[in-house]
Image (tube, coloured by chain):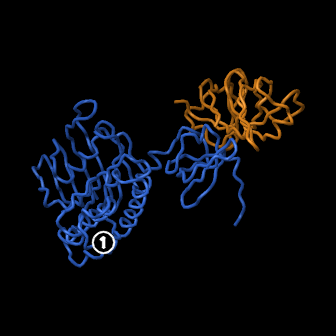
Amino acid sequence: MIEIDVVKRIKTASGEVDMHAKVDIEKGGFCSLFGKSGAGKTTIMRLLAGLTDPDDGVIKISGKTWYDKKNKINIPVNRRKCGFVFQDYALFPNMTVRRNVDYASVNKSNVDILIDMVGMTELKDRKPATLSGGQRQRVALARALAAEPEILLLDEPFAALDADMRNTLQNELKTIHDTLGVTTILVSHDKGEVFKLANKVYVLDDGVITNVGSPEEVFTDNTISGKFKFTGRVLKVEKADCLYILTLSIGTEVGHVVATHSEAHDLAAGDRVLVYTKAFNPSVRKI
Amino acid sequence: MNQLEAKVLHYRTSGQIILCELETFGSEVTAVILDSPGELAYLKEGNSLNILFKETEVIIAAGEIGQLSLNNRFKGTITAMEKGDIFTSLSIDFGTGITSVITTKSVNRLGLAVGKEVTALVKANEIAIGRRD
């Protein structure tokens, strides 16, 4: 269980504000901090890692106090067990993939398992300069996990990658999280990414937490009545006659929807959509 | 999706089904929805909300209409047409604009053209309501 309840003066787009960050994450959970740049997302990560000190408050991890202003407790950075992955890889350029992961590892026997888990076994003797952006982020993830952190902190880790690679790495990260169960915090401004990975999301705006809940609760449009509403992802948009055929993935199923120009003109593959119909329309049959 | 501003005249419920009588641009509209009024804070007599219905659910009648069950009738003029092989998209103005998508076969049978007067018809259970932001 991670309990953060701190105040920190930060600079935002609209001036200096006292950010009151109250964040609770259950052990093994996957939480996302969502918002525009300058909203305070990265500051919360830095407060947690001990890279910057709060002005007041308490940070507790699994019952252990990492920071407590009143009782003058401040565990130093190197004793806080945080694994980091940033947008830029920060790998040691003179070390091979395997050495990079090994260097950070607590348990040497896990190094090859982790390299295998991120799909880098074939490339384990390569140096970072010869790897693609996606491959370097895989190594950075394996290295962060090798330190056996209590919390994995991911700060826009896939933002510099192209859409396909981002999608692949998001899926891999999900599998790894499901397997290892490391409590993870992801900073992101990509709704689709948050939907896919997080089970809890904190929305930040100018240093204020404006909304908390599951991605469905936070992002799903409640402005239209309807008992048959789902969120889906656009897989394909095709023009047919004067209409459009949308291929959508909803949950684990794929379906098709006929859309008009006004619905489809600004849609592209990858977009998230609300799919709704009147409760009168669907037909059902026992299977 | 057609989206029009409408005013709530009154509504009544039977179990979870709500029948709303509304008014939009001088025409009366009936919408039947499945929800509980308590969850729809914007459903209040005198309130403005949005009514929404899909273009492909808008029926077009030309000339005199005989006896029909449909309550929702918008009498207007065709202002634009986009003709496809199978479907045609019609823009209709009855004080505000709505779109109807019907088969090109029907467009030809009814002799529809820009400037022609038509009535757009929508079943009450095809109309959804939504909050105006």
Picture coordinates of residue A133 (x, y %)?
Answer: 32, 58
Compared across the picture, whether B34 is left or right of A43 comes to right
Q: Which chain is blue?
A: A
Whether residue B30 is visible: no
Looking at the image, residue A68 lies above or below residue B25: below
| Residue type indicated by callout 1 | Leu
The chain containing the residue under callout 1 comes to A
Q: Quadrant of residue B10?
A: top right
Q: Nearer the viewer, residue A75 or B113?
A: B113
Q: Residue at x 79, y 34 (%)?
A: B60
Looking at the image, residue A251 lies above or below residue B25: below
Q: Residue at x 17, y 69 (%)?
A: A103
Q: Residue at x 77, y 25 (%)?
A: B75
Residue most extreme to the left: A72
Q: Judging from the image, what secondary structure is the residue with disc 1 in?
A: helix
Q: Quadrant of residue B87?
A: top right
Residue most extreme to the bottom: A109
The image shows a total of numbered marks equal to: 1
Q: Which residue is mark 1?
A: A123
Q: Residue at x 80, y 27 (%)?
A: B118
Q: Nearer the viewer, residue A189 or A203?
A: A189
Q: Quadrant of the N terminus of chain A?
A: bottom left
Whether residue A166 is visible: yes
Picture coordinates of residue A281 (x, y %)?
Answer: 70, 48
Looking at the image, residue A148 lies above or below residue A4: below
Picture coordinates of residue A50 (x, y %)?
Answer: 16, 52
Label 1 environment density (alpha carbons within 10 Å; few <14, some 14–19, many ≥20): some
Q: Which chain is orange?
A: B
Compared across the picture, whether A194 is left or right of B90 comes to left
Picture coordinates of residue B110 (x, y %)?
Answer: 85, 33
Looking at the image, residue B70 lies above or below residue A199: above
